[in-house]
Amino acid sequence: MSAKIAGFAEDAAETSPRAATATPVAIADLRSDTVTKPSAKMRAAMAAADVGDDVYGEDPTINRLEARAAETFGREAALFVPSGTMGNQTAIRLHTQHGQEVICTERAHIAEWEMAMASAFSGCQLRTLPANRGVITWGEIEPHITGVHYHRAQTGLIALENTHNMAGGAVVPLPVLEEIWAGAAERGLPVHLDGARIFNAAVALGVGVRELTRGFTTVMFCLSKGLGAPVGSLLVGSRELMDRARIIRKGLGGGMRQAGILAAAGLIALEEGPQRLHEDHANARLLAERLARLPQVELDLESVRTNIVIFRLRGQGDATALMGRLRQHGVLCGTSGRNSIRFVTHLDVDRAACEEAARITEEALAE
């Protein structure tokens, strides 16, 4: 989830990762919040980072980052991983056994953008359920839970996503989560959060991340999206779970050596990134309001709560063709379906650039 391939963000678009051969010059690169460049402060910290061998647990900057992440989320321990996908798949392996089932929403990142790794690596199948604007309730989950059974896969894990990427950055409210946590606890089931953009959810809801995630067994969050780090995510949970997760990470090839160079940027992202996310949300709202008034666009303004704007083209409009026209005029974006375009705001696209992107999109749609 932290990959930054020209013309493609793996959580963003249904286009080929080799669709572009060079990084395009853009007025506004709205493909994903993974495209941000590290700040001068991050680059200086990376150059000066105190490092050691993290596989031996001897990288002091990695250790500081993991301790700070655990403290932020009110957990015993944390584990640095190269990507959010690795964090999610490590958690699935932690909580399940081969032949079990993971309940998630039908457009969850673990279902659509993680290469079927729940089955390939953990031997689990996904029970995907429809969700209203990315939000699923305990009442919708509970009927699909299977206990000990000799004909069906037993439920091993409930996995949620907040914010929900393919639902346009939708946020899951705390009362909905609390009901799920309570129901899962009664059934003895772990609950994992794909919190790639959990800080965006926290800002939108006005609730701290510790409170917003307190009932999850494990939480994964990304440093390399809205927080602005070049690489990395963290998995947080109990010390016992993180000790086991470290073994799984090694098996996935995630045991890095002098990784403190990356953690140095991650520390800055964790401390400073959340403080400016409201700007990205305001810019996304600007784009959404400009686009929603166009006759060619179908866009529910109520769904735009964070930094993602997804809109449909009326009359079976061709999203890939529109993406190509926008690219010619310096606006880069992704698709989320044949007829849907996705914009993601971030720290490298300011308000003026978003206003220009809106103008260019209006003209492209009018062609």
Image (cartoon, helix red, strand yellow):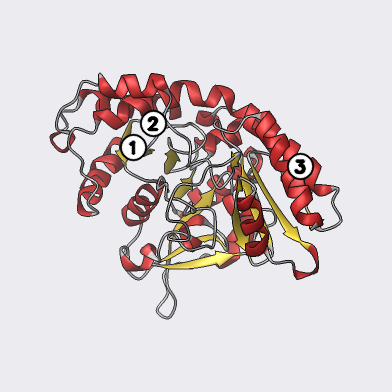
**Residue contact between numbered discs 3 and 1, judged by CB atoms under 8 Å:** no
Tell me if residue 10 can be seen. Answer: yes
Q: Which residue is mark 1?
A: 238
Residue visible at 59% across and 32% down in the picture = 202
Residue 229 rendering spot, x and y as whole percentages = 41, 32
- The Cα atoms of the two marked residues, 2 and 1, are separated by 6 Å
Residue visible at 80% across and 41% down in the picture = 289
Residue visible at 50% across and 47% down in the picture = 24
* Residue type, label 2: Arg
Q: Which residue is mark 3?
A: 359
* Residue type, label 3: Arg
Q: Quadrant of residue 318?
A: bottom right
Q: Is residue 132 left or right of residue 122?
A: right
Q: Is residue 320 above or below residue 237?
A: below
Mark 3 or mark 2: name the one nearer the start of the chain: 2
Q: Secondary structure at mark 2?
A: loop
- The Cα atoms of the two marked residues, 3 and 2, are separated by 45 Å
Q: Is residue 226 above or below residue 149?
A: above
